[in-house]
Amino acid sequence: MCFFQGDPLSSRSPDPGRLGSLPARRERGFSLIEAIVAIAIIGSAIMISAALLNTLIISADHLRTQEQLLSEIESAVEMMRAGILPLKSGP
């Protein structure tokens, strides 16, 4: 059984009453699948952003600790240069 008459590449559409034709449907809003996919993408973006923010906070804390240690070392070197803190060699 052939659904099309004549050239299959013609611009004619099949009769709406024939088998195999799909009814025309108006698209209004979003489908459930589109909404679920959008929520999954947004959720993934939020989770990645939260993980990145957590990593940045940990790195900033580590950097702050290193800055404090460096400041203490610089103070000790300046005290040694001024002769306030004597140099010790060995244990």
Image: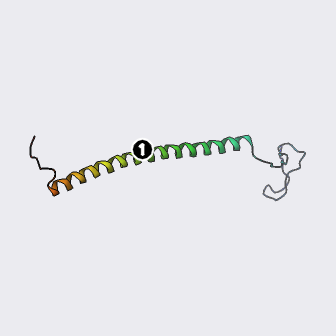
Foreground: 71 or 6? 71
Q: Which sits in the foreground, 84 or 14?
A: 84
Estimate the x, y position of residue 36 in percent, counting from the top left: 67, 40
Q: Which residue: 49% across, 43% down? A: 51
Q: Position of residue 38 (x, y in %)?
A: 66, 45
Query: In percent of the image, x 10 and y 47: which residue is there?
Result: 88
CA neighbours of label 1 inside 10 A, class few (<14), some (14 to 19), many (20+)? few
Q: How many marks?
A: 1
Image quarter of residue 47: top right
| Residue occupying image coordinates x 49% and y 46% | 53
Q: Amino acid at mark 1?
A: Ile
Q: Residue at x 57, y 44 (%)?
A: 46
- 59 to the left or right of 75: right
Taking the image as shown, residue 74 lies to the left or right of residue 58, namely left
Residue 80 is left or right of residue 55, and the answer is left
Camera-side residue of 24 and 15 = 24
Provide the secondary structure element on which disc 1 rests: helix
Work out which quarter of the rendered image holds the C terminus and state it: top left
Outermost residue toward the bottom? Answer: 11
Q: Position of residue 65 (x, y in %)?
A: 34, 46
Q: Nearer the viewer, residue 16 or 73?
A: 73
Residue for badge 1: 58
User: In the rendered view of the protein, which quadrant contains the N terminus?
Assistant: top right
